[in-house]
Image: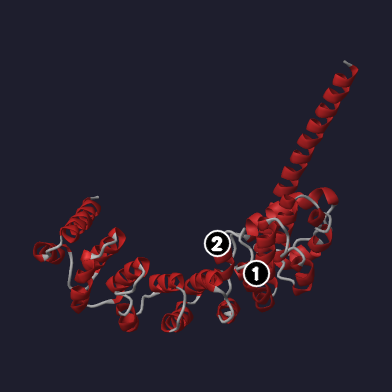
Amino acid sequence: MLLASVLLAIIVFLRVRAQRRDRRDIQARQYWSEILQRELAGETVQVNPLQRDEVIGFIEAWNALCETLPDASVRRLASLGHRVGLAQAAQRMLRGSYHDRAMTIIALGHLRDRHLYDQLAKFLDDRSPIVSLCAARALAQVDPPRAMAAFVPMIAQREDWVPGSVARILAENVDGSAAHEISNALLRANADSTVKLVRFLADIDPQRAAVVVRQLLDGHVDDHIISVCLQLITDPQDRERVIGFLTASRWHVRMHAAAALGRIGSNGDSVRLEALLSDSVWWVRYRTAQALLILPGMGAAALREVQSRHTDAYGRDIIEQVLSEHALRSSV
């Protein structure tokens, strides 16, 4: 009974302390949110250095506001961050839980202070994917060229990094260093890395990606790479390249070639695509019928005519399915 009483007392004490800490953090966040808004409005507010019990509330208010602002406004707020001593006050938080580390790293990134680069770079190899990605984004805000040189080679190595988060960091890069580093990395990448990197390059710099895609398609590369490159093609000047893959031995290459020709081809390519309606693989026939439907000069009526003269039963069936799906979408 004595032990149970002691444990109950400890639990009550911890609960009360946690509630007190939460109230303190909420009050600090409200106070600093008001100060930040005044600073953003152009008022130079007199502030004192952050106290230990204010750090969490300030960081929460700071991050919440900075995430909604354009880069120029964030840089304007940075002077207040320096005046309150955010970089110095955050040292304890960087040794805390992964949540504290992540929030603090994000906050330091918004300072846009190159002197913080080496300190933040230590977290790029953190075993937590959240912390390491937060560090990568913060570094990209602090010193973009240097950050991309370190970040891009790690993309292929870190299987635990969420592609969407990586894409966001790359998309936020405005000085072109991300595209430059990816292009360099592609020169020495293996098949798996190439697939991953070329997709990211297409998202942030389509023109540069188009050049890389052409080089890959013209070279002797893995069929998986060819499939990915065919998915990324949007330029009609690559039409002849795409046509060359319609008769590839691997079905997934034929499938993606048919889909690509539907995007960039001309009315005269319908004959080439019609031949694939008799392909032995269902997915090839399906993507081919879809490609014929969107080909310039085609449409539902023209595809119905193809169906009427096609001699292969599987080809006629797949056209019927695609036309039915098209009619259903049109009626919604």
The residue beneath circle 1 is 154
Image x and y of residue 19, in percent: 76, 35
In the rendered image, is residue 42 in sight? no
Residue at point 50% right, 70% down?
A: 195
Residue at point 17% right, 69% down?
A: 298
In the rendered image, is residue 173 in sight? yes
Image x and y of residue 135, in percent: 70, 63
Residue 141 in the image: above or below residue 91: below
The residue furthest top is 1
> Quadrant where the N terminus lies?
top right
Mark 1: which amino acid? Met
Kindly check if marks 1 and 2 are in contact, taking CB atoms under 8 A apart as contact.
no
The residue furthest right is 2
Residue 116 in the image: above or below residue 15: below
Residue 120 occupies quadrant: bottom right
Residue at point 29% right, 75% down?
A: 247
Residue 289 occupies quadrant: bottom left
- Residue nearest the observer in this picture, 67 or 227: 227
Tell me how many marks there are: 2
The residue beneath circle 2 is 163
* Left or right placement of residue 57 versus residue 183 in this view: right
Residue 172: mark: none
Residue 87 in the image: above or below residue 267: above
* Left or right placement of residue 330 versus residue 21 in this view: left
Determine the CA span between mark 1 and mark 2: 12 Å
The earlier-in-sequence mark between 1 and 2 is 1
Image x and y of residue 157, in percent: 63, 66
Residue at point 78% right, 71% down?
A: 118
Secondary structure at numbered mark 1 = helix
